Image (cartoon, rainbow, N blue to C red):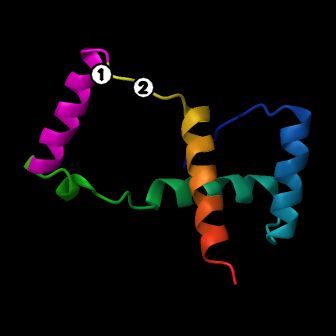
Amino acid sequence: MHQVHIQLHEQLFDQAQRRAVEAGFATLDEYIVDVVSEDLTRETENLDHRFTPTVVAHLNQIQEEIKAGAKTYSEAEMDEHFRERANQWREAHTS
């Protein structure tokens, strides 16, 4: 077993200590070991099967359109667009 020393800012230390107590850990060290272990053992879903030749071709087409000067959108613009669409859907489906 290896021993690791870490430094946490006071606010982060306090939050971690509270979470450790709330979760029933005897020490903050045990909590940190559990969090790291959980993160490392969690399986990452393999999504390669979703990138079919058709999907890849479509993504390549989009990339070429962007290179040719097609309009691109910021994250804020996308958020606003989908917020508006969600509101329209809710209004149309609210009795």
Let me know if residue 64 is in the magenta part: yes
Mark 1 crowd level (few <14, some 14–19, many ≥20, 10 Å Cα): few
Amino acid at pointer 2: Thr
Which segment is the magenta one?
Answer: 54-69
The secondary element bearing badge 2 is classed as loop
The answer to which of marks 1 and 2 sits earlier in the sequence is 1
Amino acid at pointer 1: Ile
Q: CA distance from mark 1 to mark 2?
A: 7 Å
**Quarter of image, res 26:** bottom right
- Classify residue 3 as left or right of residue 21: left
Let me know if residue 66 is in the magenta part: yes
Dominant secondary structure of the residues highlighted in magenta in the image: helix
| Residue 81 position (above or below residue 91) | above
Label 1 close to label 2 by CB (< 8 Å): yes
Please give the residue where the numbered disc 2 appears in the rendered image.
Answer: 72
Residue 57 x/y as whole percent: 12, 40
Residue 24 x/y as whole percent: 81, 72
Could you tell me which residue is drawn at 13 percent across and 52 percent down? 52
